[in-house]
Image (cartoon, rainbow, N blue to C red):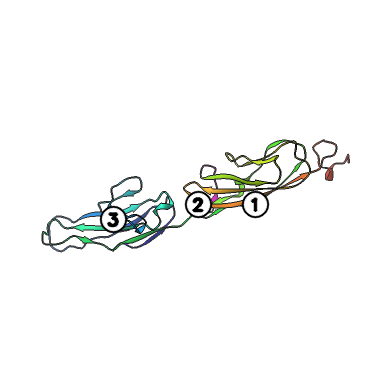
Amino acid sequence: QPVDHLTNINRAITFSATATISGSGTEPTYQWQVNDGGTSSWVDLTDNTNYSGSTTANLVVTPNNSTFNSNQYRVIINTPSYVCDTDFTSNAAVLSIISNIISANNDGIEVVEKVANSAIVNVLSNDLLNNTSALISEVTLSQISTSNAGISLDTSTGNISVTSAVTSGIYFLEYSICENVDPTNCSNGIVTIVVQKDTDGDQIPDATDPDI
C-alpha cells in the first residue's frame, strides 16, 4: 500500500505499490490516480512535469506549488491474465506540503547626511531561504513602509537607496520577502538607517571630523 508523504515545493517524492501475483502470465498494469485536495473526484494521471511513472508501480510527484497540499493518491492494479480477478484499488495516501524556512533578517547601516547613494545596503545580503542565501530570482521583495520618503527599497535588486535630501536622524524601512513558488510563505525585516550629521559638508560625520 502507498504511504503518506511530507515534502517541500519542488522536492520530488515517490508513492509505491507493488502487486504480488502467483503463477505465470501477463504482468499486472498500474494506473495512478489523484484526488485534488482530497475533496474532489479521482482522476487518472498521465506523465507530465509534475508526475512520472503514472502507469508503473512507482509514482514520482514533484509539487511545484502549494496547491498540491492534501492531494490524495491511489493506484488501480489490473491483472489481464486473470480474467476472473477484479481490479485492485489501493488505499489513498496523502501528500502534505510544508513551506521552506524563510527569514528576512534585520539590517543596520550608518551613512552621512545629504549624500545620495543608490545602494547603502542590500537587504538580501543576510536573508535566508531554506537555510541558504535568498536570491532575487527566488523571492519577491516588497517595501512595506519607510519613515523617510528619501529612503526606499529597489525591489528588483534589494538595494536600499537614500537621496541627498535626507538629513541627520534615525530612520526605519520595513520590507517583506515572499517565496516565488509559495507566495504565502513570507517574512518581514526592518532596516535601521542612522544618518549622521555633517555640518561642513565634507562627507565626514561630525562625530569623527577633526574640522568640527
Kindly report the distance in space between the C-alpha atoms of the residues bearing marks 1 and 2: 20 Å
Kindly report the distance in space between the C-alpha atoms of the residues bearing marks 3 and 1: 46 Å
Task: From the image, state whether disc 1 or disc 2 is nearer to you.
Answer: 2
Q: Which quarter of the rendering shows the C terminus?
A: top right
Task: Identify residue for label 3.
Answer: 42
Secondary-structure class at tag 2: strand
Task: Identify residue for label 1.
Answer: 106
In the shown orientation, is residue 146 left or right of residue 155? right
Kindly report the distance in space between the C-alpha atoms of the residues bearing marks 2 and 3: 27 Å
Task: From the image, state whether disc 3 or disc 1 is nearer to you.
Answer: 3
At label 2, the amino acid type is Thr
Pick the residue in front: 46 or 12: 46
- Taking the magenta stretch, the answer to whether it contains residue 161 is no
Residue occupying the point 65% across, 52% down: 106
Secondary-structure class at tag 3: loop
Which label belongs to residue 83?
Answer: none
Q: Pointers 3 and 1 in contact (CB under 8 A)? A: no
Q: Pointers 2 and 3 in contact (CB under 8 A)? A: no
In the shown orientation, is residue 22 left or right of residue 139? left
Query: How many residues crowd mark 3 within 10 Å: few (<14), some (14–19), many (20+)?
Result: some
Task: Identify residue for label 2.
Answer: 184
At label 3, the amino acid type is Trp
Magenta span dominant secondary structure: loop
Pick the residue in front: 33 or 79: 33
* Residue 154 horizontal/vertical position (percent): 61, 39
Region in magenta: 132-137
* Residue 210 horizontal/vertical position (percent): 87, 41
Secondary-structure class at tag 1: loop
Count of picture labels: 3
